[in-house]
Image (cartoon, rainbow, N blue to C red):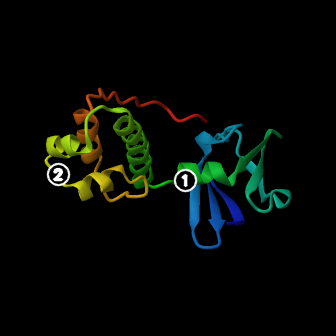
Amino acid sequence: VKIQRVVANEHKRAFEVQLEDRTLSFPYFKATPRPTRMDRVHQVKVRMDLAHRGFTYVLASGRHGAVHLDRVFDDNEPPRHTRDVLVYKLTLEARTRVAATELSKREIIRRLKTSPAQLSRILDTSNYRKSVDQVLALLQVLDCEIDVVVRDKDR
């Protein structure tokens, strides 16, 4: 994926990054240095030396900034992606716990009130159609305490 062009949109207070198939937005407040109403974007251009995977900008004050395409993608990832990552991490933990438990698979299946095929689907890391509830129920059967931590993303 390559950046075709970048436009500084003062009205939206964001860079509009045009790719081959879509346009993504990257808000000014996530850029360093941050463009402001008093220090507007003077120039913005795609970085050829980064194989069109980043862009640089110059503010009216002369300060320079750069943004890599990965940061733009991180900012535009769909909420479903966050859910899928959570399901994946919980599934990995459940697989580790099932391997270490003294409970038989038959007993786990009985406690979950499910089938052997369903347990296999819950433990399949490539299955994203399962619910978070199913994996949490399995972890509960395995006598795990689950604690959720929400924090700001690293910039």
The x and y percentages for residue 73 are 58, 54
Contact check, label 2 and label 1, Cβ < 8 Å:
no
Q: Mark 1, residues whose alpha carbon is within 10 Å: few (<14), some, or many (≥20)?
A: few
User: What's the residue type where badge 2 is placed?
Assistant: Thr
**Which residue is situated farthest in the bottom direction here?**
21
Label 1: which residue? 12
Q: For the residue labelled by badge 1, is the local secondary structure a helix, a strand or a loop?
A: loop
Q: Where's the N terminus, which quadrant?
A: bottom right
Q: Is residue 10 visible?
A: no
What residue type is disc 1 on? Lys
Residue that badge 2 annotates: 114
| Residue 29, quarter of picture | top right
Tell me where residue 7 appears, x and y as whole percent. Answer: 68, 60
* Crowd around label 2: few <14 · some 14–19 · many ≥20 (10 Å): few
Q: Residue at left 15%, top 44%?
A: 110
Q: Is residue 120 left or right of residue 114?
A: right
Q: Residue 14 vs residue 48: left or right?
A: left
What residue is rendered at 38% in x and 47% in y? 87
Q: State left or right for residue 154 relative to residue 34.
A: left
Question: Residue 85 got which mark?
Answer: none
Q: Nearer the viewer, residue 18 or 94?
A: 94
Disc with the residue nearer the chain's start (2 vs 1): 1
Above or below, 19 against 147 in this view is: below
**Front-most of residues 70 and 24:** 70
Q: Secondary structure at mark 2?
A: loop
Residue 134 place in picture, x, y as percent:
25, 47
Q: Nearer the viewer, mark 2 or mark 1?
A: 2
